[in-house]
Image (tube, helix red, strand yellow):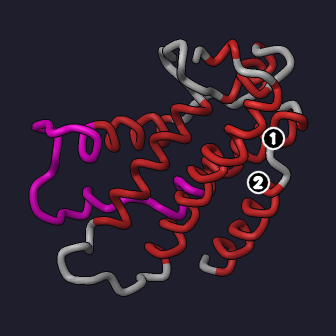
Amino acid sequence: MKTRDLTQEQLHEYFAEHVRYEVQMLLNMASGILQRLQIAQGLQHAPIESYAIHLRNLITFLYPSSPRDTDVCAKDFFIDEKTWENIRPELSKTLVDAKIRADKEVGHLTTFRQNGTPKSKEWDVRGLTKELILIFKLFCEHADKAKLGSSIREIIIHYGMVMALQC
């Protein structure tokens, strides 16, 4: 089904299940990484890879570069699709670089992958999460409330407090 054919109710359901999941996973992974939770041997890279994938998905949701007919994007949750493009901040170099890095280092096998564990391979989980969540909060404040799940704000507020305590 093409995104433009979705009803208000279908968008509400999509947001409540899928967009909410992306936010929850991003925040759960960020929290786990920042708390340095113990991970089983052989799975030590899974949290940062999961974080990168969900970060990439949310950046693409908020700032689609060339969406297909079936891609659900932030603009779909506004009465006038142009509203989001007009009010959202410009995509920062930090988020552009993070998306490219997730594309190259996690999403594909490329020569851009870094060998070993140099300092440049670390992700600024705290900074990227804070930046993205501020944009997502702006999205939630201005999107058509009938299309949003009500619990998303609670998740952002809860994890915003958790992130603040970890600073």
On screen, residue 76 versus residue 122, left or right, reads right
Q: Is residue 152 magenta?
A: no
Q: Nearer the viewer, residue 118 or 76?
A: 76
User: Residue 148's mark?
Assistant: 1
In the rendered image, residue 38, in percent from the top left (x then y), is placed at 36, 87
Bin the neighbour count of mark 2 within 10 Å (Cα to Cα): few under 14, some 14-19, many 20 and up: some
Mark 1 falls on what kind of element? loop
Residue drawn at 47 percent across, 42 percent down? 94
Secondary structure at numbered mark 2: helix
Span shown in magenta: 104-129
In depth, the one of 153 and 71 nearer the eye is 71
Which image quadrant: the C terminus? bottom right
Q: Position of residue 82 (x, y in %)?
A: 76, 13
Q: CA distance from mark 2 to mark 1?
A: 8 Å
Labels 2 & 1 near each other (Cβ < 8 A):
yes
Specify whether residue 106 is painted magenta. yes
Q: Residue at x 73, y 62 (%)?
A: 155
Amino acid type of the residue tagged 2 in the rendering = Ile
Q: Label 1: few (<14), some or many (≥20) within 10 Å?
A: many
- Inspect the image, locate mark 1, and give the three-letter code of the amino acid beneath it: Leu
Quadrant where the N terminus lies?
Answer: top right
Specify the label residue 163 is tagged with.
none
Identify the residue shown where x is 49% and y is 40%.
57
Which residue is the site of mark 2? Answer: 152
Q: In x, y percent, where is residue 39?
A: 32, 82
Instruction: Relative to 54, say whether 116 is above or below.
Output: below
Camera-side residue of 46 and 13: 13
Look at the picture and state if 131 lies above or below 79: below
Horizontal relation, residue 156 to residue 127: left or right: right
